[in-house]
Image: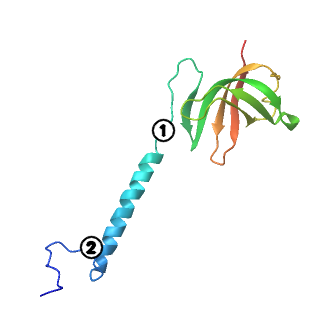
Amino acid sequence: MKGMRPQSPVPDVLDRSSPPLRLFAVLLAGGVVFAGALAGCSKATASGNPTGSASASQVRGAKTYSAKGVIKSFGPDRKSVNIAHEEIPGYMAAMTMSFEAGSPGQLDGVAVGDKITFSFRSEEDGRQVLTEIKKEP
């Protein structure tokens, strides 16, 4: 009996003599890892900030955010604008970045140096598209 392992009442799932059980264990472990990753990715970012300074809401797969900022410059033909914006909690730190105009003429009535409030959609392809822009009094 030397060299023989004692018989276990529970099948060894890694034992090559039991491929269906091994396959089941591997699939089960993979499913648990996938479910954990999926749960971590579904964390929603939203702020119920009544001052309107920075907030987010879900819209058709893209998130919409609102913030305050200062216009620094415009892109060619005023199709985009560079805005130095405040921190958007849960999304990004304060920085200067470019936003695409959501419609023709949307940037009419605002100028470099204007303090503004604005809303934008963060598209899945990485573009930031303005949905609203207003000059602060």
**Quarter assignment of residue 119:** top right
Q: Is residue 1 above or below residue 49?
A: below
Mark 1 — residue? 44
Q: Quadrant of the C terminus?
A: top right
Q: Quadrant where the N terminus lies?
A: bottom left
Q: Nearer the viewer, residue 78 or 21?
A: 21
Label 2: few (<14), some (14–19) or many (≥20) C-alpha neighbours in 10 Å: some
Which quarter of the picture shows residue 115? top right
| Residue extending furthest toward the front | 2
Give the SS element for disc 2.
Answer: loop
Marks 2/1: CA–CA distance: 38 Å
Residue 2, percent across and down?
A: 14, 86
Residue extending farthest right: 77
Q: In this rendered view, identify the residue nearer to me: 82 or 3.
A: 3
Q: Is residue 37 left or right of residue 60?
A: left
Reply above or below: 86 against 92.
above
Residue for badge 2: 13
The residue at the point 55 percent across, 30 percent down is 89
Q: Amino acid at mark 1?
A: Ala
Residue 112 coordinates in the image, percent (x, y): 82, 23
Q: SS for tag 1?
A: loop
